[in-house]
Image (spheres, rainbow, N blue to C red):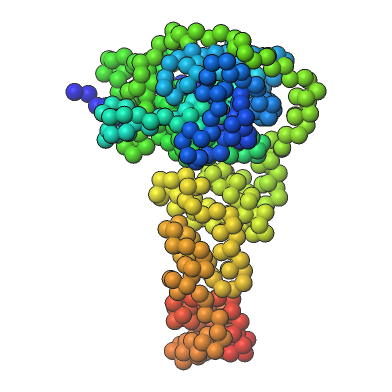
Amino acid sequence: MTADVLEIDDALAQFDPVMGLEVHVELNTKSKMFCGCPTEFGAPPNTQTCPVCLGLPGALPVVNARAVESAIKIGLALNCEIAEWCRFARKNYFYPDMPKNFQTSQYDEPIAYNGWTEVVVDGETYRIEIERAHMEEDTGKSTHVGGATGRIHGASHSLVDYNRAGIPLIEIVTKTIEVPAEKAAAVARAYVSMLRDLLLALGVSDVRMDQGSLRCDANVSLKPKGSSVLGTRTETKNVNSFRSVERAITYEITRQAAVLVAGGKVLQETRHWHEDTGITTSGREKSDADDYRYFPEPDLVPVAPSRDWVEEIRSSLPEAPSLRRVRLQEDWGFTDLEMRDVINGNALEPIVATVELGVTPAAAKKWWLGELARAANESGQDLDALGVGPAQVAEVQKLVDDGKLNDKLARQVFDGLIKGEGSPAEIIKARGLELVSDDSALIDAIDRAIAANPDVVEKVNSGKPAAAGALIGAVMKDMRGQADAAKVRELLNARLGI
Ligand SMILES: [Zn+2]
């Protein structure tokens, strides 16, 4: 019996991973790709359908212009060429979540192709080549009922909801990604995270990974160190968080390495990622010859965006993320190392949003990196899944600025926010965190400290004002940390006449 997986260091010592990433983005258009049905998430099943997206005989699709515009935006932001003329194609397959029995997609004529982008990992910049970004439509959603696992095996029946069928998708496909072996999984994570930020900045998707509006399929293969022969790849489907992208790829590297070291063969197949156990399991065996019988869609006219329109869209694009990062670092006065920590902690966007609410960059960084990113890391979550937003960080910082909280108490408020204990005000009340602002209570504590430390007072009076620090410490301890240290210093100085 051989091990199921190799240690990652062992695996990377013997093999170089080769990756390809396919990211599906659900666009935030008001209506579907080829009909006028609404696209809001969470409506009762099958209430957002019509003859077109149900594929009823005789129904004719019409392309959503806003979706084409979004596709061009994404293509331009990824430095792609934009096709002067391209067509949709039918991808034929039979599956219950596909009411038309084919998916309208693009095949050999994508709207955007030949692009590139960059990601930063540990201060190093890695270039990622983009093969293509094409338009297609989403499928419906199947729910398998009656089994223990929610999968079709063991289920007594299945339900299907076509509300999602026909929602516009852009599929972004990278060329082969080859980076230093030990960086591969982190580069993949950084790429998906960068895409999320980019798509948000473009305003083309709400990019909710937890609702499936950004999904990543990761192709991974291994080649022996020094070899130029590519190995057999697997495709891990629908990985739904940044952290999972990194974990799933790391797992596949260690699994395939164990297979190869034992003299086995990696099967070309799709695999399922299991968030709870951190492993992938075998899905459908896949061959390159999968025959979808693509052919040009006869019911849709070709898409031929005029060059004027493309240039107009280009001129409306927001600042490129890499340039924006340089500008923000200058505006904020962060060092290279601080900026690297911010990027690595996925805290850039939250800090931007918090600074926009009037918080200083230094304070925003302190809370997002020092408290929230750390907590997210400890609990194995993505930062935006913690349930704490820029507005709450700004609210807590305002309480600090107003002298109602100090940093130590603010940390406890954040702990309460993460644990879902309510608003900052509710947490402060329930946990009794308010600073003592009553001067007479502070002066009483100061008098107790002076009485208990005559030697310190003696030092201060003999011309060593720095010794007063010990008295401030005593007062803070007496007040169980619930005092504003600056205020205590002010009152103490007045009391001692310094
Ligand atoms: Zn419809």
Q: Quadrant of residue 323?
A: top right
Q: Is residue 435 visible?
A: yes
Which residue shows up at 75% across the image and 24% down it?
310
Q: Is residue 485 left or right of residue 375?
A: right
Residue sticking out furthest to the right: 308
Above or below, 263 against 126 in this view is above
Foreground: 275 or 256?
275
Q: Quadrant of residue 321?
A: top right
The quadrant the C terminus occupies is: bottom right
Q: Is residue 464 visible?
A: no
Which residue shows up at 66% across the image and 36% down it?
202
Foreground: 448 or 285?
285
Q: Position of residue 195 (x, y in %)?
A: 58, 34
Which residue shows up at 28% across the image and 26% down it?
153
Q: Position of residue 151 (x, y in %)?
A: 32, 30
The quadrant the N terminus occupies is: top left
Which of the four quarters of the rendered structure image does ligand 1 lie in? top right
Q: Is residue 142 left or right of residue 79?
A: left
Above or below, 437 against 369 in this view is below
Which residue shows up at 55% across the image and 84% down it?
438
Count of numbered tags: 0
Q: Position of residue 135 (x, y in %)?
A: 60, 22
